[in-house]
Amino acid sequence: MVREFELPDVGEGVAEGELLRWRVEPGDAVSEDQPVAEVETDKAVVDVPSPVDGVVEELRAAEGEMVPVGDVIIVFRVDGEDGPKATETAPADDTAAGSGQQTEVGATAQPAEETLSEPAITQRVQVPAPPSVRRLARELGVDISSVADSSSGRITEPDVRAYASPESSTQERSSQQTTAAEQRTQQAAPAQSVSPAQTREVVDRETTVAVPKTRHIAAEEGIDLDTVPTDEQKDGEPFVTLEAVQEYAEAQQQAQQTDRDAVAERAAADEPARPESRKPYKGIRQTIGAAMTSSKYTAPHVTHQDEVDVTALVDARSTLRQEAEAHDIRLTYMPFVMKACAAALQENPQVNVSLDEANEEIVEKQYYNIGVATATDDGLLVPVVENVDAKGLLEVASETNEKTQKARERSLSPEEMRGGTFTISNIGGIGGEYGTPIINQPESAILALGEIKKKPRVVEADGEETIEPRHIMTLSLSFDHRVLDGADAAQFTNSIQKYLQNPNLLLLE
């Protein structure tokens, strides 16, 4: 039995995914739950498992193709069962091409008399070519609909390469385009039609008869009725229908778009050549862009900035680092800041909230899951460490190291990036000092850490003031002004400063 397998929803709210790599080929035997493809969706790369034990019959999507959730991507033949009749499943364009027919998805067979009695319509005809050939055409910049097949009934790699070859002259390509167009026309012959507005030249009459509604539509479209072609007459005068006006308007718009495209091409050709390269804006980078745009234009961002003396924190980390290394744990400043933020959120619960706009409610959260913004080659990912308040410093450090490494290796699962209540971004790791980070919604605040630098500060001891070099870290807290006020941000930042200035207080948490 043939089993068609659709791309499943591999992540929350995912509508489509990019098929990065097939792990199987037609003819391969597979077992249930065996990974058959890698798909990139939202912020993660996930394996798509086989739902059955069987043999790969056909791959319906090409590597690099964006596939909507619910589209068939692979066909299996289940072991030990007979195949279905040809009428039980609609053939893919590859199998249809082998029989010399092209079948549109969703098309329904009609009796011959009904088909002949129906008015002619314009029908889209699929180009008969397998996914590998389509991918080659994209790589070579070839419009596959302009390539004529070599006689096998489907376009092959040699057809595409011959069309794209530098030795192929303009005349030869024009001939191929004509041949391809004739083939497409023959395939769709019974259903082709062309509107009169697209085939006749513009006319210029002195008088034209039309009903008031037609004249109203023509005026809205800016069309002179005396220029609309027509064969109809009324009382001996040219008569223009509403359909003729609409077809004429569409033809004019298409012609204008063609002119604009030609002008743009000529302008591009006149531009001096400059060295540049392009890469697709898709996948993780596109997802990040959409999330940042949504956050920035939804939540009114305000950034509160301050400095904190972390000299005691630098000393504490230096003392504890050797102990952490004995447990094979790399101890950075991040776990201290995460623990400080969890403690500050407990003291300032108004910050540990999210806004439910649909129900017009502010959701107060009694759990403290801290996200750590992590730079990767593909963009910024935010792994989440759950229940930071209930974990020890070394446990937080170990889990943070593990998840940030998985983020850089692109092996982080979607579940490991969900459920955060607050996010920290360490811009100091690359030398930054102050920033205005964008909130990771639906959270209400995000903290950016600046680089720790030695700066002169006035230090009071035993009633005397002296100027000493101290380790100073900058804090930039962006918050959603719909649910938090400036005073809330200042109080929360002061709580963080308290724990970072005196890290021994974290031992009480």
Image (tube, rainbow, N blue to C red):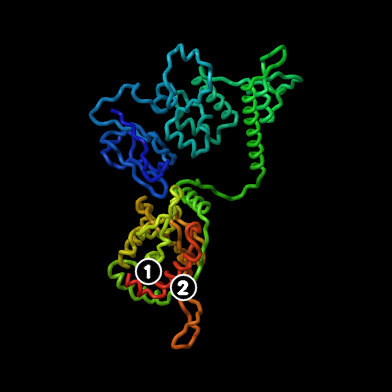
**Residue flagged by tag 2: what amino acid is it?**
Val
Mark drawn on residue 490? none
Q: Position of residue 271 (x, y in %)?
A: 66, 45
Q: Which image quadrant: the N terminus?
A: top left
Mark drawn on residue 308? 2
Tell me if I can see residue 337 in this picture: yes
Tell me if I can see residue 450 in this picture: no
Above/below status of 308 relative to 368: below
Q: Which residue lies furthest to the front in this view?
A: 360
Task: Left or right? Give the position of 41 relative to 192.
Answer: left
Give the residue number, with chain letter if any, for mark 1: 336
Task: Left or right? Give the position of 100 relative to 119.
Answer: left
Q: Which image quadrant: the C terminus?
A: bottom left
Task: Left or right? Give the position of 6 relative to 358.
Answer: left
Q: How crowded is mark 1: few (under 14 residues within 10 Å), some or many (20 or more)?
A: many
Are discs 2 and 1 less than 8 Å apart at CB?
no
Q: Where is residue 226 in the image (x, y as percent from the top left)?
A: 72, 22
Q: How crowded is mark 2: few (under 14 residues within 10 Å), some or many (20 or more)?
A: some
For the residue pair 295 and 426, the one nearer the viewer reads as 295
Q: Where is residue 135 in the image (x, y as percent from the top left)?
A: 45, 37
Mark 1, secondary structure of its residue = helix
Q: Where is residue 456 in the image (x, y as percent from the top left)?
A: 51, 79
Q: Quadrant of residue 34?
A: top left
Q: In which quarter of the image is residue 409?
A: bottom left
For the residue pair 481 and 233, the one nearer the viewer reads as 481
For the point 24% across and 27% down, the residue is 81
**Residue flagged by tag 1: what amino acid is it?**
Phe
Q: How far apart are marks 2 and 1 (CA)?
A: 14 Å
Mark 2, secondary structure of its residue = strand
For the residue pair 199 and 63, the one nearer the viewer reads as 199
Above/below status of 120 relative to 395: above
